Amino acid sequence: MWKWILGAISAAVVALGAIGGVMVYRTAQLTAAPAAAEAAGAAAPIAIDADAAARRLSQAIQIQTVSRTEGVVEDPETFAALHLLLAREYPRAHAALQHEIVLDHSLLFTWSGSDPALAPILLLAHQDVVPVEAGTEGDWEQPPFSGAIANGYVWGRGAVDDKGSLIAIFEGMEALLAQGFQPRRTVLLAFGHDEETLGGGASAIAALLQQRSVRPWFVLDEGMAVVEDFPLTGGPVALIGIAEKGYMSVRVTARADGGHSSMPQADTAAERLSRAILALRANPFPGGLDDGPTGQMLQVLAPQMPYAARLAIANRWAFNGVLIRQTEATPSGNALLRTTIAPTMIDGGAKENVLPQEMHAIVNLRLHPRDTVDSALAHLRAAVADIPNVTIEPEGTPSNPSPVSATDSDSYRLIEAAARTFAPEGAPVAPMLVLGATDSRHFAGVAENVYRFAPMRAPQSELGRIHGTGERMSVENLTRMAQFYAELVRTGAQ
Ligand SMILES: [Zn+2]
C-alpha cells in the first residue's frame, strides 16, 4: 500500500532539498508512546468464570430479541425473557443496583456511588439483534439462534453485536460485587432494545437522564475493537471510536412527459434520473484529514507505519495531498475522509411500452463530522441543479454526525489505559471515526465525551460475520471484555 507513497515522497524530498532535513528531523520526533508505566503496578485482572459466562451468553442468544422494523417490537415476550435471565444469572447486580424499565423494554441500572458529587460513568449495550437473512440459515457453521458453544466460540446472532457486551458488562459488575467493591462514583448501565432500528429506547434513556440533570463523566458504547491486522500498520491496533458518522437517505425524483414509447421525446425520466445519479457520484463531498478523527488516528499510528508514511504524516504541511490520495484509494479509507454517496435503490416505470412520468432513486449518505444533514442536502442539490425536473428530498429520519469527543480528556486516558491492558502487548491504542451508527449517538447532549470500544480481538475477516453469516464470540474475548469493564469501573469509579 505504501510503495507508491514512498516513490512520491522520495522525489519530493529530493526536490525540496534543504527542507528534507527538517522533514527527516520531524519524522524522527514521531516515536511510539512509551509503554504504559502503570502496567507495572496494575492489579491482576478480575477473575471471571469463562465457562459460566459463555453459558449465559449462549442462553441470551437463544432468546430471539430481533429488531426488524422501525418502531415495532415484534415479540415483547422475548425482552421479558431476557430480563428474567439477567435477573436470575446476576443476582448481586439486581440486588445492589437500582433497576428501571424505560419505554417498556429498555433497561437502566444505577449503582450509586458513595460520593454523589462525582459525575457518573455510563456504560451502554443493546439487547436487540438484527434478523438472520432468510435462506442463509444453512450457511451458518452452527444454527444462528442455537447459542452453540463449540471450538472455543459462542455461536449465534448477537454473539458480538451486542449481547456479548451486554453479558460482559454484567459479568464484570457481578464479579466486582462479589469482591465487595463499592464505587465512589456512580455507575450507570443502559441497555436499549431497538438499537438496530430507531434507537428509541436509548433516546428515551438519554431524555430521562437529561430530565434528571444527570451529566455523566463519559459514555462508553460498542462500536470499535482491537483489529489484529489493521491495514495501516499490518499489526494489532486497539481502536477507540471518538465520533460516528451521521446517516441520511434521500429520494431523487426525475420527471418528464410520459407518452408512448414508440415516439420517445428527447429527454426521458430514466435519462434524467441516470444523469442525476452520475452527477451525484461525480461530485464527491470535500474530504480531508484536517485535525479530525482520521488525522488524529494517523498521528498516533505513525510510529508503527513504514518510514515513508511516517515521513508524510510528520510533514503533513507538505504531504497532505499525497496522504489524502493514498487514504481515499480504498472504499474504507475514503469513508474515513468524507461523507459518502451510495445509490442503493432505483424504481419507476409500470409497463415496457410506456414512458414513465416519474422515476425515483434512493441514495444513502454517511455524513462525516464536518457535514450536517442540511449542508449535505445543499451539496447534493447543487450537483444536480442543471438537470431539468430533478428534485432531492430527505427520506426517513436523518441523523447528524456525532460531535468529536476529546482524546486529551481524563476519561479518554482511562479508557486508553484499560484498552492497553487488554490489547496485545505493544499494540497502539488509536482514536477512530466509527462508520456505522450506535445507540451512543443519542447521548451527545447528555455527556461531553462519548466513546465506543470493547477489547474484542479479531482479524478484519472476522468482522464480516457481524450482521452477516456465522456471527460468533470467542470465549476468550468474552472473558477479556468482562475483565475490561470491571477494570474500567474499578479504576474509574473507585
Ligand atoms: Zn450493535
Image: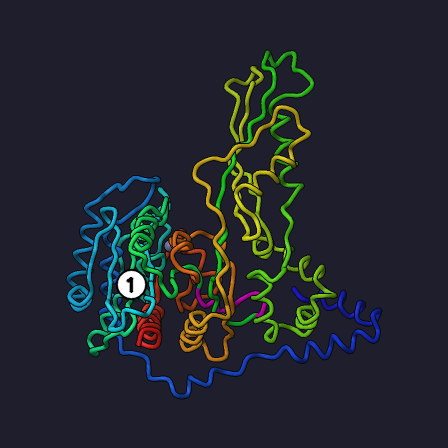
Nearest the viewer among 478 and 110 is 110
Element class at badge 1: strand
Q: Amino acid at mark 1?
A: Leu
Report the front residue among 161 and 287: 287
In magenta segment, residue 230: yes
Give the percent coordinates (x, y) of residue 494. 30, 77
User: Taking 60 as reference, is 253 above or below it?
Assistant: above
Tell me the residue at 17%/69% (across/down): 92
The residue shown at (53%, 38%) is 363
Up-down relation of residue 453 to residue 134 (above or below) = below
- Mark 1 CB within 8 Å of ligand 1: no
Q: Residue at x 46, y 65 (%)?
A: 240
What residue would you read off at disc 1? Answer: 188
Q: Position of residue 152 (x, y in %)?
A: 32, 68
Mark 1 is surrounded, within 10 Å at the Cα level, by few (under 14), some (14 to 19) or many (20 or more) other residues, namely many
Q: Left of 432 or right of it: where is 101?
A: left
- Going by the picture, which residue comes out furthest to the bottom? 40
Q: Quadrant of ligand 1?
A: bottom left
Q: Which residues are magenta?
A: 225-233
Q: Is residue 300 left or right of residue 434?
A: right
Q: Position of residue 198 (x, y in %)?
A: 37, 44
